[in-house]
Image (tube, rainbow, N blue to C red):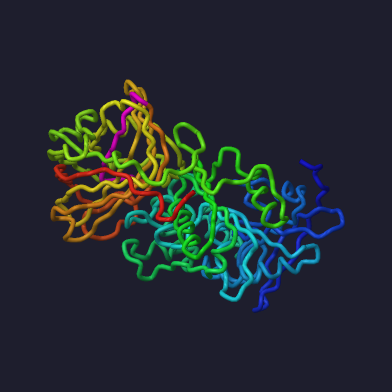
Amino acid sequence: MPDALPVESSDTWMPCADGVKLASRVWKPSTPGRWPVLLVRQPYGRAIASTITAAHPHWYAQQGYAVVVQDVRGRGDSAGQFEGFAQEALDGATAVQWARSLPFADGKVGTYGFSYQGLTQVLGSADMAPPDAMAPAMTGLDERLHWASDGGAHRWALGLGWALQLAAETVRRRGDRDAWQAIRRSLESGQFLMEGMALLERHDPNGMGLGWLHLDPREPHGWRCHHPPPALLRQPMLLIGGWLDPHLCGVLDLLERSRACGGSAKLLVGPWTHLNWNGGIDQLQLAFFDRHLRGREPTKMPAACALGDLTSGAWVPAPAAPHPSLVWGLRSGGLAAINANEGQLTEAGKGGGAVWLVHDPWRPCPGRGGHLALEAGLVERGDIDQRSDVACFTSAPLPQDVQLCGRPELVVDLAADQLGHDLCGALSVVRAGGSQVLQLCTGVSRWLGHDALTVQRRRLQFQPLLATLRAGECLRLSLAAAAWPQIAVNPGDGYHPRGLTGPDHRVITLQFSLQEAQLHLKPLTSAKLC
């Protein structure tokens, strides 16, 4: 690698068409010259600069780039009113054009960043000249499906936590120190899980996060789904996701949209959570930008598709489709909810029996780890599986190594005795001898109304995964009727829940008919991956 260039930084302001000015910080080589620009637009204060998951902009500037990190409208030191994602298409188009025209710019613009910063990259106007290369990470276009909910249930802990983080910036800009402290105390103590809605109503009643919590996550009506211009989706794109990140399905959706528009987006999915990328991908990201912004052919480029295995740690190309033999039936003599070792994952077509599971709202089953937890990740869940409100189905020890790659789905006939119920599942690997039950992925689904009372075929979608199970290990499916605080506890009265258990919450009994039940893997995406 060539010697690092000396770097200087400064603040500047971007004018918008309506007169609003957006604060921006620039890191660039201090030697004479013009440089390709890397643009990051985010709502958390430009000094943070996506360093939670990426190298500091100073490092990119040392490699010969100008990095511009911008406070979006109404955040940090930027003027204007913050209106969430709705504002970013117009401001983003302006920012790309402005970045090209900076006096130190060579005309090429790339974008990077994760989460909010990921979505700001792929929003724009139809008449804009799109960025020359993009690296959107852990993001999605559908605010309902990719940001706010899973399986018809609001992401309670994650949604409230993020909404309150945004609200804290709103009250800071107002100079309301007492409100900021109240929000911070609630988040640190965990009280926000119970009082978060009231805090949002009081301090940020027009905020995007509270707006999501007031919408029905089972229906698309009222929700915003963004539609980037096709020309933007055709640009070189490095899409970055994590198996334990809540936005993974949004990344896979972006891949499909890019390919449908004639783009050739690359896909990189690692064994990562939203905030922990196990050392980051900055060298790969730099190689991607070197090729598309500087015309260089680096020695190490991201593959067209590379997937990091959750259990082995190996990086592999994606299989064309899940192996057709990876289909299981469910069998129990009725004790799967009282004896974690009684229920079986069997060969397809050999399932049967019935299971009754009782959800007591006084002691709801906890959610742990996975993609929806505040502390996301791979976790041990053997103690949860020992609860009598969790039904477990475990395979025989595997005769050989098995790679699970795809979107797990459970199909099962199920009825409740109340007007609403949730179904919360986990897939785990049981280590040889039962020494560990390592949770790999989770899924949730919610049903409300009279349909919950009748036996119907229900579908439970799990977070996509890639994991290798070794010979002698077992696969386990665990089912419960709650995952607190990842989703709010279902009251059983047909209405959406708004938090933890209350005095009107009902005991809910679920009856599973296993004769036709099936656990199978669907492809990761309809797009060709490699």
Residue 179 in view here: no
Residue at the far bottom in the pictured view:
18
237 relative to 322 in the view: left or right: right
Position in image of residue 274 (x %, y %): 51, 47
Q: Is residue 474 magenta?
A: yes
* Residue at (39, 53) in percent of width and height: 155
Q: Is residue 129 above or below residue 150?
A: below
Q: Residue at x 39, y 38 (%)?
A: 440
Report whether 428 appears left or right of 209: left
Is residue 495 shown left or right of residue 484?
left
Q: Position of residue 258 (x, y in %)?
A: 50, 61
Q: Nearer the viewer, residue 41 or 178?
A: 41
Describe residue 297's horizontal placement relative to residue 341 as left or right. right
Q: Is residue 310 visible?
A: yes
Farthest residue, direction top: 433
Q: Is residue 39 above or below residue 483?
A: below
- Location of residue 42 in the rendering, given as x and y in whole percent from the top left corner: 61, 59
Q: Quadrant of residue 37?
A: bottom right
State the image coordinates of residue 281 (x, y, percent, origin top left). Answer: 61, 44
Q: Residue 97, relative to residue 519: is it above or below?
A: below
**Front in this rendered view, residue 253 or 173:** 253
- Residue found farthest to the right: 32
Name the residue rendered at 14%, 51% in the picture: 417
Q: Is residue 220 magenta?
A: no
Count of picture labels: 0
Instruction: Please report the bounds of the magenta region as a residue range.
Output: 471-483
Q: In the picture, which quadrant includes the N terminus?
A: top right
Residue in the picture at 41% in, 36% down: 467
Q: Which is nearer the eye, 5 or 390?
A: 5
